[in-house]
Image (cartoon, rainbow, N blue to C red):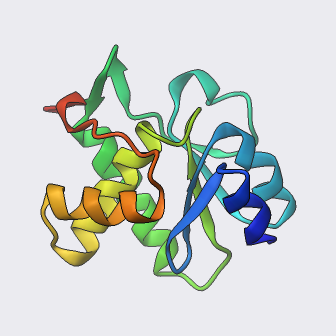
Amino acid sequence: MDERFLVEAQIAHRVLPRLWIGTEGSCGPAKAAGLTRLCVHEALAQAHDCVCLPILVGPNQASRARIDRAVAWVIGELNKSGPDILVHCGGGQERAGLVALFTVMSMFGTSVDDAYDWLRAIRPQIKDRRSWVTAP
């Protein structure tokens, strides 16, 4: 994959050695490059040939159970030898950011603040959406 294109175009960033976070626009280039793709946006679930695990249950309400399911899928894929993984939503700022946040917290035992700081150092457009997280 041409990382320069994805990063220069601000459509995807590598946040872990095999994990990318990106926009809907990064899905096509990621597919062409052979990445496994996870869509976490409910309205885009049928638009792409991706694994689809939407995380919202209402306007600005992300189910913790759905986030945990997406994180478990990501970590399971990272534990396999295989292609890189792209987690995407529409803008690569909110839903995909939440999945990346909880993946980093789960894998490294970091706090929410530290995980957000780390992710924003790599992908500055990630927005803090911890207020969206609700009980299952």
The residue drawn where x is 51% and y is 70% is 77
- Is 65 on the left-hand or right-hand side of 126? left
Total numbered labels: 0
Give the quadrant of the C terminus: top left
Q: Position of residue 71 (x, y in %)?
A: 36, 57
Q: Farthest residue in the bottom direction?
A: 81
Give the image quarter of residue 21: bottom right
- Is 59 on the left-hand or right-hand side of 124? left
Q: Position of residue 10 (x, y in %)?
A: 65, 51
For the residue pair 21 and 45, the one nearer the viewer reads as 21
Q: Farthest residue in the top direction?
A: 59
Give the image quarter of residue 104: bottom left
The residue drawn where x is 73% and y is 29% is 47
Q: Compared to 30, does 11 lie above or below?
A: above
Q: Position of residue 83 (x, y in %)?
A: 68, 75
The residue drawn where x is 62% and y is 42% is 23
Q: Farthest residue in the right direction?
A: 32
Q: Compared to 125, does 86 lie above or below?
A: below
Q: Compared to 57, does 26 lie above or below?
A: below
- Is 110 on the left-hand or right-hand side of 18? left
Q: Position of residue 109 (x, y in %)?
A: 16, 73
Give the quadrant of the N terminus: bottom right
The residue drawn where x is 24% and y is 29% is 132
